[in-house]
Amino acid sequence: MHNPKQIYDHNGNEVTHGRVTVNGVRLHYVTAGSGEPLLLLHGVPKTLFYWHKLIPQLSKYYTVIAPDVRGFGDSGKPKGGYDMDNIGEDIAQLMEHLGHKTYKVHGEDWGAAFAYALTAKYPERVEKLSWCEMLLPGLGLEDWSVLKPENVYSNHWLWHINFFHVPEVPEFLISGKERQFWGKWMRDECYDPSGINEDLVDEIVRCCSSPGGLRPIFDVYRATFENIDFVNEKIKNKLKMPVYAIGSIHFIGDEVHREANIFAENVTTEFLDCGHSLALERPAQLAEMLRKFMG
């Protein structure tokens, strides 16, 4: 019997769940399929359930690995370590534990930032990087959060960057209203709001309303200045492996392409006709694009 809270592979089999402690944090992850390893990294405030439409499209061709990033989903929620450098290290150690010396990576939103951090730290391990719908700290993330007309009257004013950075206040205001806040916030970033279904909202609310569940979400943003230093240092050495930069027509768009060309030498650019949540709004199209790029 199909469980809407579970993720299935292309044959209708449940994904395999695992847990391992790496870099001082206990990570929960799932695997599915066979073939070359393809790592999926989710954004904020999401969990690995974000990939529930994409994994069945990819597991026929790849061994798909999808972790709950530090602080999210059913992974541990330590008090620190939410900067890109440290989360990139979490993921590198996870993949090493799973026996994957080299692999392909797809990340969206903050998952793209974590994917970049992993790749910049260990370029010899990442064969190809798909970097989607993200502005890196220091390259544009803060600029889109500024209170000015061209941001406020656009489709992409990132007002939350500043709000989430304030210590303790977001936790206080959102606690008890997780469903209303995150449901609206994620749908507002979509071109097709129906992509954010209730099963996804249920999973996010379950995890962020658990003890300590909200804090990691905001601690990712509170690491912005550390992340700026990390990015500014790493972009001095451009990535040499193939990088796929996908922007949504109705959200971040070609800014994704501009930034990818700052940190990488070999960039393929493309658009998807959707909003911020590519894997939910256009899963079949995204899967086909990734198959062509990843090989």
Image (cartoon, rainbow, N blue to C red):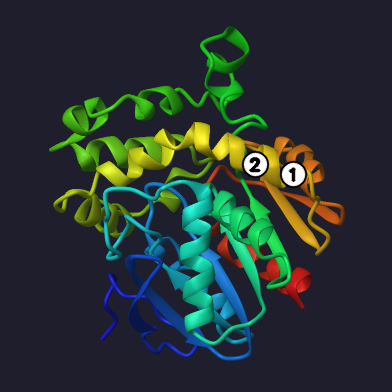
Taking the view exactly as shown, the residue that stands out farthest to the top is 149
Inspect this view and state whether residue 153 appears: yes
Near-viewer residue (265 or 268)? 265
Question: Which residue is located at x 55 percent, y 83 percent?
Answer: 59
**Does residue 278 appear left or right of residue 221 in this picture?**
right
**Image location (x, y in percent) of residue 69:** 40, 60
Residue drawn 59% across the image and 20% down it: 154
Calculate the distance from the C-alpha at mark 1 to the C-alpha at mark 2.
6 Å
Pointer 1 residue:
235
* 86 shown above or below 52: above
Given the image, on which type of amino acid does mark 1 rest? Ile
Q: Amino acid at mark 2?
A: Val
Neighbour tally class for label 1: few under 14, some 14-19, many 20 plus, Cα within 10 Å: few
Name the residue rendered at 53%, 52% in the picture.
Answer: 85
Q: Nearer the viewer, residue 195 or 67?
A: 67
Q: Which residue is mark 2?
A: 231
Q: Position of residue 82 (x, y in %)?
A: 41, 48
Discs 1, 2 touching: Cβ within 8 Å: yes
Mark 2 nearby-residue class (10 Å; few <14, some 14–19, many ≥20): many
